[in-house]
Amino acid sequence: MINDPGVNALDGAVGCGDQLRKAREAAGLSLEQVAGQLRMPVQVVAALEAEQWDRLGAPVFVRGQLRSYARLLKVDLGGLLAQARIAPVEPPTLVSHTHTPRVRRVAESLGRRAVYVVITAVLAVPVWYVISGNSNSQPPSTASLDEVPAAPASADLAASAPSAAAPQVRQAPADNGPYIASMAPVSRPAVAAVASALVLEFKGDSWVNILAPDGATVEKALVRAGETRSFNAGQVGSMVLGNAAEVEVKQASGAVDLTPYKRGNVARFTVSSDGSVAPVSH
């Protein structure tokens, strides 16, 4: 269970907003101008200056927004932010249904190959047994299934010269062994691997809020550096990624540039049924 950060999680940062407001006014910038340069809503900039932390979400997001604002105005907030008390965040114990362990993938691959080997053996062994059981010193004759084999020439000659003392008897053709038909091997199409429509690789800790197309929560937690998440097409409807600079989003066509979807260091975007991303419509 994730602990509620609480309204007072940034009490140690009191005074940051006042310094930022004074620096903005000294630079002759309006709230709208600052919001445009930071790519933040005007309400967020005003809340930062008013130190209304409870309106800005999780403390980790607030600290990132304060740092972005301070860098823009060249204000040093290091001391105040260092004193800010961040409530501990304990990630929930989740079992990802979209991430298949490597051992399981290898076992499934070996299982499929074993099935193919068994099917091939079941088909090939009876054919080999029939062929080997009917083999003789002479190689078997082959002929097209569309033609009837002709009688040997010796049989035709004997039939054309009948004896005067005996009735004409047509000699049966010599047995040249069984005729076999050649069968071309049946080719089986390879089973194509199902690729994940969207993959997230976390280079640093990031708070995520991932929703399904129907609005249900897929995952809402702090994901640690080094972890990955993969989702199939149609599984995810929208995402919010904190500390977005440390998250790499990949599709089958390559990495996704999160710049158009970022506000400060938070990325928000929707995911279509085929895995492509688009800005969040307001």
Image (spheres, helix red, strand yellow):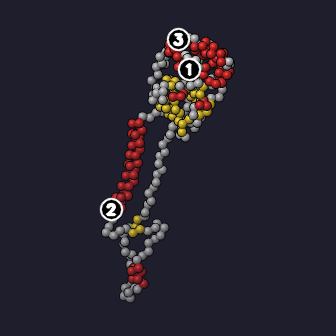
Q: In this view, does 241 lie above or below 157?
A: above
Q: Distance between the residues labelled 2 and 3?
A: 91 Å
**Dots 3, 1 in contact, CB < 8 A:** no
- The residue that appears at 38% across and 78% down in the rendered structure is 171
**Which residue is disc 2 drawn over?**
133
Q: Percent x, y for residue 82?
A: 50, 15
Q: How far apart are marks 3 and 1 (CA)?
A: 15 Å
Relative horizontal placement of residue 138, taking residue 210 as reference (left or right) = left
Image quarter where the C terminus lies is top right
Disc assigned to residue 130? none
Q: How far apart are marks 2 and 1 (CA)?
A: 84 Å
Q: Mark 2 or mark 3, which has the lower sequence index?
A: 3
**Which residue is disc 3 drawn over?**
12
Q: Is mark 1 on a helix, strand or loop?
A: helix
Amino acid at pointer 3: Gly
**Which residue is disc 1 drawn over?**
67
Q: Depth-wise, is mark 3 or mark 1 nearer the camera?
A: 1
Mark 1 is surrounded, within 10 Å at the Cα level, by few (under 14), some (14 to 19) or many (20 or more) other residues, namely: some
Mark 3 is surrounded, within 10 Å at the Cα level, by few (under 14), some (14 to 19) or many (20 or more) other residues, namely: some
Q: Is mark 3 on a helix, strand or loop?
A: helix
Q: Percent x, y for residue 75?
A: 58, 17
Q: Compare residues 147 and 113 and report the one nearer the observer.
A: 113
Q: Is mark 2 on a helix, strand or loop?
A: helix
- The residue that appears at 44% across and 68% down in the rendered structure is 143
Q: Compare residues 56 and 130 and report the one nearer the observer.
A: 56
Q: Answer with the quarter of the image where residue 36 lies.
A: top right
Does residue 20 appear in the picture of this structure? yes
Amino acid at pointer 1: Arg
- The residue that appears at 41% across and 83% down in the rendered structure is 157
- The residue that appears at 62% across and 24% down in the rendered structure is 38
Q: Mark 3 or mark 1, which has the lower sequence index?
A: 3
Q: In this view, does 41 lie above or below 273?
A: above
